[in-house]
Image (cartoon, coloured by chain):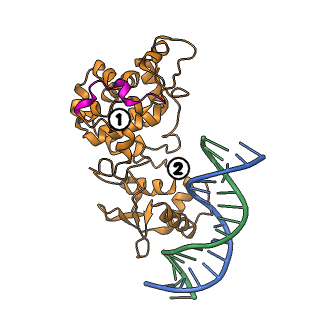
Chain colours: A orange, B blue, C green
Amino acid sequence: MTTAEDLRPAQAGGTGERRVMLDSVTHSTFLPNASFCDPLMSWTDLFSNEEYYPAFEHQTACDAYWTSVHPEYWTKRHVWDWIQFCCDQYKLDINCISFCHFNVSGLQLCSMTQEEFVEAGGVCGEYLYFILQNIRSQGCSFLNDVEESKVAIKDYAEPSCLKTSGVKSQGCHSHGHSRTSLQSSHLWEFVRDLLLSPEENCGILEWEDREQGIFRVVKSEALAKMWGQRKKNDRMTYEKLSRALRYYYKTGILERVDRRLVYKFGRNAHGWQEDKL
DNA sequence: GCCTGTTTTCCTGCTT
DNA sequence: GAAGCAGGAAAACAGG
């Protein structure tokens, strides 16, 4: 069992092996005041609990709604999304972060001091504090470039609560897009981003029911051509593209709509909602 | 090199 | 008849 005591040398040590395993550190390690909320509630509970955190798995910063909103205007849900993203992105151990301390709105989050972040999450909390300060000072564009983010954070503090291999480029690499950058690596993300980018859309796709996530392919051949260009495949056709779309029915990313050229985002698709909350 | 997930390609049958 | 949809099968491809 790793304890906070065990972590100190790693935090203090500035050279060589600054990686530290926090996998076995429970949230209670940094949770002296946990009694005022459900002591059994953990991040794992939160993210697997439909009531608290409905159907929002696999989210990345780039497609999360909170990236387009200043931290001061975040809701509790945005705060949770952000923390989950940071943990995924920077290999922080979410179990060492106190859920109770971060069950706050963005405004409250922004008013928290560095000491309060440390109290809430130890070295991970401190790291979150630096990331938040970067977002507040540089805006959300900070999150769209992982490499820049790493450099910026490094300027603030040396990461010392990383799980295994320090800051590791991922997430936005594979899903490398801003909400409307059309750099999505997956077809459904490409379609989603096209729907969210009127300037790129050119009437190729249009919403039928924005709230329900129902959209229509208006120019099927143009869509296929665009996707083909994206994948450097000039043999792409709408028939092939639609086959790929139909595979998403299995995974819940798309849902069947019994109308021609009409599709609907499913429970496992994210980032298409105007305002999820 | 293997495994896994995603996408592409081709196909048949059906519906609009 | 053309276009689109449904879904099986296999292959290609990329990332881990």
Examine the rendered structure and indicate whether residue A257 appears above or below residue A161: below
Q: Is residue A200 left or right of residue A17?
A: left
Examine the rendered structure and indicate whether residue B16 appears above or below residue A106: below
Instruction: Identify the residue position indicated by label 2 in the image.
Output: A185
- The type of residue carrying mark 2 is Ser
Q: Residue C2 sits in which quadrant?
A: bottom right
Question: Could one spot residue A145 in this view of the protein?
Answer: no
Residue A234 percent location from the top left of the image: 61, 60
SS state under label 2: loop
Examine the rendered structure and indicate whether residue A207 appears above or below residue A55: below
User: Mark 2: few, some, or many residues within 10 Å (few <14, many ≥20)?
Assistant: some
Q: Magenta segment: does it hold A68? A: no
Residue A45 percent location from the top left of the image: 36, 43
- The mark found on residue A249 in the picture is none
Residue A7 percent location from the top left of the image: 46, 18
Write down the region rendered in magenta. A24-36
User: Mark 1: few, some, or many residues within 10 Å (few <14, many ≥20)?
Assistant: some
N-terminal of the pair, mark 2 or mark 1, is 1
SS state under label 1: helix
Q: Residue at x 35, y 62 (%)?
A: A213
Q: Chain of mark 1?
A: A
Could you say which is closer to the camera, residue A123 or residue A65?
A123
Q: Chain of mark 2?
A: A
Could you say which is closer to the camera, residue A12 or residue A67?
A12
Q: Residue A265 sits in which quadrant?
A: bottom left
Residue A256 percent location from the top left of the image: 43, 70
- The mark found on residue A140 in the picture is 1
